[in-house]
């Protein structure tokens, strides 16, 4: 399903699901070793891990425009970088 920002912003289930997914990603990133993160500097590990604090603990103050920007701009870039990491490791 492809939606625009208004569809996203008006669907509480989608907003909460995406925020939960971002929290999960941040938690997983926090479990990566410093060595692994330093070997893959093209990914903004600190920013990803920090998103948990905003998403989980200040949800009411969270701007959905920022989450939308993360979904549309940041995640595709991170996806490309992770695919590069996987292809190098094979």
Image: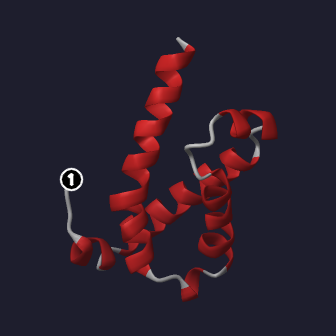
Res 65 quadrant in image: bottom left
In screen coordinates, is 56 left or right of 68? Answer: right
Which residue is outermost to the right? 34
For label 1, count other residues whose C-alpha is less than 10 Å away and answer few (under 14), some (14-19) or many (20+): few
Pointer 1 residue: 1
Residue at 70%, 40% (x, y): give it: 37
Secondary structure found at label 1: loop
In screen coordinates, is 39 left or right of 1? Answer: right
Residue at 62%, 61% (x, y): give it: 47
Query: How is the protein colored in the picture?
Result: secondary structure
In screen coordinates, is 62 left or right of 51? Answer: left
Res 64 quadrant in image: bottom left
x and y percent of residue 54 in the render?
A: 63, 75
x and y percent of residue 28 in the render?
A: 67, 45
Residue at 47%, 38% (x, y): give it: 81
Which residue is outermost to the bottom? 61
Which residue is more in the foreground, 21 or 38? 38
> Is residue 68 positioned above or below 61 on the image?
above
x and y percent of residue 39 in the render?
A: 69, 33
């Amino acid at each position: 399903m492809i939606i625009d920002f208004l569809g996203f912003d008006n669907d509480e289930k989608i907003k909460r699901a995406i925020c939960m997914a971002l929290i999960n990603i941040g938690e997983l990133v926090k479990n990566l070793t410093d060595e692994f993160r330093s070997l893959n500097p093209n990914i903004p590990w600190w920013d990803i891990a920090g998103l948990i604090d905003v998403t989980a603990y200040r949800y009411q103050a969270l701007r959905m425009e920022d989450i939308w920007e993360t979904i549309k701009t940041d995640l595709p870039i991170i996806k490309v970088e992770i695919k590069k990491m996987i292809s190098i490791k094979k």
